[in-house]
Image (cartoon, coloured by chain):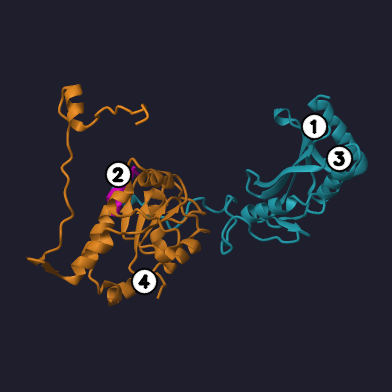
């Protein structure tokens, strides 16, 4: 003891309720639901699809492709207030090769199109694409000769988030939708003829 | 020196050195603007650049325009002499079917990218330019987008069709 002990005020919820004389709304926390399966002492048996889907959905590594104001909303989404890390997307991957989810946020000029396509092609399967904002979804207000009228003209898109720009809550909602897709996706989907057909329709192998 | 005096002096100097060059000399928004004929345009620029008194050593801007009747294209040069702090605008125009004009890259190296941009958007060919190709738009583009004959809007747009608005 050197005489400089700091007296900390007890600022916990109980004290706060006493001080303010009104009850505080509390969020009811829910654990992630485990997949359907057979449970016994010391073991749990479930479908491999479900378990892998659960793991994938809660550890999506996003690749932010932010070109304009929607990118600013994305920065808010990543930061402490909205905290995308709560949903398992803590780690941004700035290399497409390690990313699971391509987030396209902002106006894509026609000259940027081939770059975006190359980034998508460099990502390893399985991969998902989130199109954030009016410009990425449809060209938005930029109905003009130089702007790509929606990124789905060059790459397949899984989830569209409308808005100009969308609020961080909406972006999170879009990511939750992608998590649902990842959870419920069959492990064979990426080898299916339908998926190959989809890629072929975009001129990809 | 007022802008009016500057315009008068400039017009006289150009008339003395380049014969039959000036089509019009105006003072819109108090800014000396001289319209010259296409064939003499390069001579006028060369005079303004190399003359010891005028010495417009800095090309502020170079861009194109299309006249309201849509039959002519033109080029605007904004020149600046920083020592005397005087500016002048030189305009020239020509038929849209033969949009050719000598390059200004031999006078100001900075004209290089500006002429590429003007070519990119208006299709004006600058004779003698070292590398006249598109600079901003995609290389595959087959139109000159700022010409009035081409629509501004992307023709592939789907969500502005009438059915989207219940019409």
- Disc 4: which residue: A199
The picture places residue B43, in percent across and down from the top left corner, at 86, 48
Q: CA distance from mark 2 to mark 3?
A: 60 Å
Q: Quadrant of the N terminus of chain A?
A: top left
The nearer-to-camera label among 2 and 3 is 2
Q: CA distance from mark 2 to mark 1?
A: 54 Å
The picture places residue A142, in percent across and down from the top left corner, at 46, 48
For this rendering, which residue is in front, A201 or A77? A77
Q: Is residue B97 left or right of residue A132?
A: right
Residue A112 in view here: yes
Q: CA distance from mark 2 to mark 4?
A: 31 Å
Give the cyan chain's letter: B
- Disc 2: which residue: A169
Verify CB contact (< 8 Å) between mark 2 and mark 4: no
Q: CA distance from mark 3 to mark 4?
A: 61 Å
Q: Which mark is residue B85?
A: 1
Q: Which mark is residue B55?
A: 3
């Amino acid at each position: 003891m050197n005489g400089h002990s700091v007296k900390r005020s007890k600022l916990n919820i109980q004290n706060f309720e006493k001080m303010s004389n009104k009850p505080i709304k509390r969020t009811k926390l829910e654990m992630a639901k485990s997949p359907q399966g057979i449970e016994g002492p010391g073991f749990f048996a479930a479908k491999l699809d479900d378990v892998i889907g659960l793991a994938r959905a809660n550890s999506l590594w996003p690749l932010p492709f932010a070109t304009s104001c929607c990118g600013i909303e994305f920065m808010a989404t990543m930061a402490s207030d909205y905290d995308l890390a709560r949903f398992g997307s803590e780690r941004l991957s700035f290399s497409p090769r390690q990313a699971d989810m391509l987030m396209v946020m902002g106006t894509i000029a026609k000259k940027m199109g081939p770059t975006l396509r190359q980034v998508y092609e460099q990502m390893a399967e399985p991969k998902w694409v989130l199109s954030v904002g009016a410009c990425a979804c449809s060209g938005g207000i930029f109905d003009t000769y130089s702007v790509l009228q929606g990124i789905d003209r060059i790459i397949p898109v899984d989830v569209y988030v409308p808005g100009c720009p969308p609020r961080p809550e909406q972006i999170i909602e879009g990511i939750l939708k992608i998590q649902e897709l990842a959870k419920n996706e069959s492990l064979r989907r990426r080898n299916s003829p339908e998926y190959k057909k989809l890629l072929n329709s975009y001129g990809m192998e | 020196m007022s802008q009016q005096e500057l315009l008068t002096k400039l017009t006289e100097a150009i008339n003395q050195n380049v014969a039959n060059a000036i089509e019009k000399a105006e003072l819109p928004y108090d800014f000396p603007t001289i319209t010259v004929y296409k064939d003499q345009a390069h001579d006028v620029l060369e005079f303004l650049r190399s003359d010891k008194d005028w010495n417009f050593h800095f090309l502020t801007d170079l861009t194109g325009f299309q006249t309201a009747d849509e039959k002519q294209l033109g080029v605007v040069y904004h020149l600046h002499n920083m020592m005397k702090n005087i500016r002048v605008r030189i305009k020239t125009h020509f038929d849209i079917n033969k949009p050719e004009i000598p390059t200004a890259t031999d006078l100001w190296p900075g004209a290089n990218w500006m002429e590429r941009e003007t070519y990119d958007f208006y299709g004006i060919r600058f004779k003698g330019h070292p590398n006249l190709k598109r600079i901003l738009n995609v290389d595959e583009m087959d139109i000159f987008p700022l010409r009035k004959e081409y629509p501004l809007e992307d023709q592939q747009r789907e969500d502005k069709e009438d059915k989207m608005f219940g019409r």
